[in-house]
Amino acid sequence: MQYIQSATRLFKMYKQLGEKSIAQIDDADLAWQQNEDSNSISNIVKHLWGNMLSRWTDFLTTDGEKPWRMRDAEFEPDTYTRNELMQKWEEGWQCLFDALGSITDADLDRIIYIRNDGLTVMDAINRQIAHYSYHVGQIVYISKLRSKSAWNSLSIPRNQSGDYNSQKFAQEKDNRDFTDEWRQK
């Protein structure tokens, strides 16, 4: 279960990173697009929501691309309020966490399918970690561009790496999980 716990911590970190980014922008900026070929934060949230529901519903027993999913619609402009968008965000992440909570060590080598392509449960989880971190990075970038006030850094702020490293190296060596520290920010 160590792998599942590690994956769950990573997913929770990316969820929080997205939420802290979205919180720093105005409601109108949720739908902002650089151009017609780029995605808004609203599009990205809808895409993550659709992907999570499709991939994680009946995760071990049905194909990860559900027939009811309307992927192309996830990228269409919409008029969702912040509250409606964040409800979709929460619904998607809850589906993911519920599915992860049902997996055991014995499941990690099982073969599941996404669009009829077989992969192990572990590979499917890794695929989704990469996919979601990619899109959360887009949310962070757009939020930083659209932030009207001073951006509250979600990582080590510029020109503070030396101080951060001094604090870290002043501690005794220990087996710590980096996501624990990050979640405290």
Image: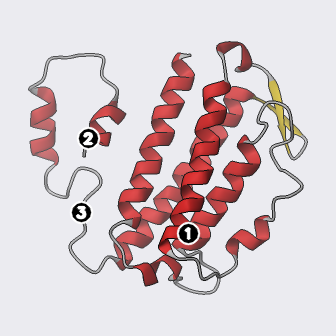
Label pair 2/1, CB-CB below 8 angstroms: no
The crowd level at tag 1 (other Cα within 10 Å; few <14, some 14-19, many 20+) is few
Q: Secondary structure at mark 2?
A: loop
Quarter of the image for residue 36 reads: bottom right
**Residue underneath mark 1:** 84
Around disc 2, counting alpha carbons within 10 Å, would you say few (fewer than 14), some (14 to 19), or many (20 or more)? few
Secondary-structure class at tag 3: loop
In the image, what residue type sits under mark 3? Asn
Q: Earlier in the sequence, mark 1 or mark 3?
A: 1
Closer to the camera, 24 or 80?
80
Against 89, is 107 above or below?
above
Tag on residue 184?
2
Q: How many marks?
A: 3
Coordinates of residue 45 in the picture (x, y in percent) = 57, 64
Horizontal side of residue 168 vs 135, given as left or right: left
Q: Left or right: where does residue 60 sit relative to residue 98?
A: right
Amino acid type of disc 2? Gln
> Mark 1, mark 3: which one is toward the viewer?
1
Residue 137 placement (x, y as % from top left)? 47, 58
Q: Earlier in the sequence, mark 2 or mark 1?
A: 1
Observer-nearest residue: 158 or 64?
A: 64
Q: Residue furthest top?
A: 106
At 16% from the left and 31% from the top, the residue drawn is 168
Of label 3 and label 2, which has the lower sequence position?
3
According to the picture, the residue beneath numbered tag 3 turns out to be 152
